[in-house]
Amino acid sequence: MRGLLIAGTTSDAGKSLVTAGVCRWLARQGLRVAPFKAQNMSNNSMVCADGAEIGRAQWLQARAAGVEPEAAMNPVLLKPGSDHRSHVIALGKPFGTLEAGEYATGRKALAQLAFDTFEELRSRFDVVVCEGAGSPAEINLRAGDYVNMGLARRFDLPVLVVGDIDRGGVLAAMYGTQALLEPADQALLAGWIVNKFRGDVGLLRPGLDRIEELTGRPVLGVLPWLDGVWIDSEDALAAAGWRREQDGGSLRVAVVRFPRASNATDVDALAAEPGVHVQLTAEPDVVRTSDIVVLPGTRATVDDLGWLRARGLDDVLAERVRAGRPVLGICGGYQMLAEEIDDDVESGAGRVRGLGLLPTTVSFSPEKVLARPVGSWRGHEVEAYEIHHGSALAHGDAEPFLDGWRVGPVWGTTWHGTLDNDGFRRAWLTEAAAQAGVSWSPSVGAPGFSALRESMVDRLADAVAEHLDTDVLLRLIRAGAPDGQRIL
């Protein structure tokens, strides 16, 4: 079998979740499937069992396919540290930095690494389902592209393009995508998928017929809006998924929306907990009045700490702590809680005053910690993962909390993924709610987060089976569509 590339008309069109659904559906057919994204730009990542760091979406797609996530599934990961620089992860390990001016032209070595990795991965699996990045019609970047049409051209992969009808303009986006592609790229464009549709498909049919006439490519199906499917995103825009699903709750959690937030997927499990309302915010009044505040991870601890101070959130957090109202810091957010931060690595800022809410000092090391630790708290087992350069050392009276520390209402840990653990999450929420003076307890019989994630992936695969032309999908994977029209 050849493989397939799933691209999108825009970021957050849904290609990550569509790819996960296709991986699960193909695995149900008895095929050994691997996901692949040649280059991912995201600060949401995961540590694999072998210590490699990959994009969070590819980790989910591997889980959907029923295989162990590995570095080869996302050979190049770019983690933006500023508007002009990204930190490069190559085959799961730190590789260097990429300046904005080098983005279009300075990636030849990374492209070759991605191509070699794809070939090796294809030799071990029946099918490799590739996910594109952004849009394949970003013609300003086409010369150095190796994740969209550059990958498809190199390996003669058929390309399906996903469009988000929920945001409007999907037919124009599809037509414009094809029109901007050069003829050799157009030849690999095999069809369209409409995503996130609500309503009567019959009303959409005249538009679909016309787009098929104009482009010469079929619409393989219309995927419905799936309520409650929003997990493990790589795109900050997709946090709107769980925001839409929440109807409110008795326990209000404010998650500070750092400009360079990293692994904000940590709070997905909170958003899924019945009776808990989670809000991403940068508003001081929301941070002040919420029951619990979470400072999530960040790819730029010192810079985002400066941003927090500029908004007056440092005073709001200090006010909360004086009132005994809980604050949880995770990784970079935990580092900010320290009395002092010494960073000559990530920001080059040297010694910086922290928020002073925990009796700790943080030092950054050039060696990046990538690990899958296990521990316990209040008798609850905790599995987690670590991705950081900064480490905190306590020098005062503090209670151990996982790998970090707790003083009164202030909690901090370097570990990501702790809230995915059902027993720990519910026990910690119960204790934090009591600190906030809120009567909250876990809902009896509520599904665990891992079970919820699995049910979401199954719903994606069910939607692929019900709403896409899977005969054409398999035909494409087996034979490709080099002229772009043979499958009509």
Image (tube, rainbow, N blue to C red):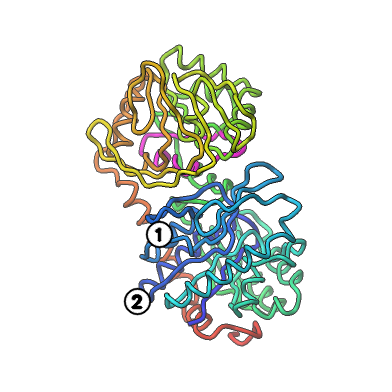
Residue 267 in the magenta stretch? The answer is yes
Spot occupied by residue 339 in the image (x, y as percentages of width and height):
51, 20
Report whether residue 197 is seen.
Answer: no
**Please, what secondary structure does the residue beneath circle 2 have?**
loop
Judge whether 40 appears above or below 433 on screen.
Answer: below
Query: Of residues 284 and 388, which is closer to you in this image?
Result: 388
- The dot on residue 235 is none
Report whether residue 454 is seen.
Answer: yes
Spot occupied by residue 251 in the image (x, y as percentages of width and height):
40, 29
Give me the residue at 33% from left, 26% from top: 400
The outermost residue toward the top is: 322
From which residue to which does the magenta span run?
257-280
Name which residue type carries label 1: Val
Residue 305 in the magenta stretch? The answer is no
> Residue 113 vs residue 420: left or right?
right
Name which residue type carries label 2: Gly
Which residue lies under the disc numbered 1?
457
Give me the residue at 35% from left, 56% from top: 454
Q: Residues within 10 Å of mark 2 (few under 14, many from 20)?
A: few
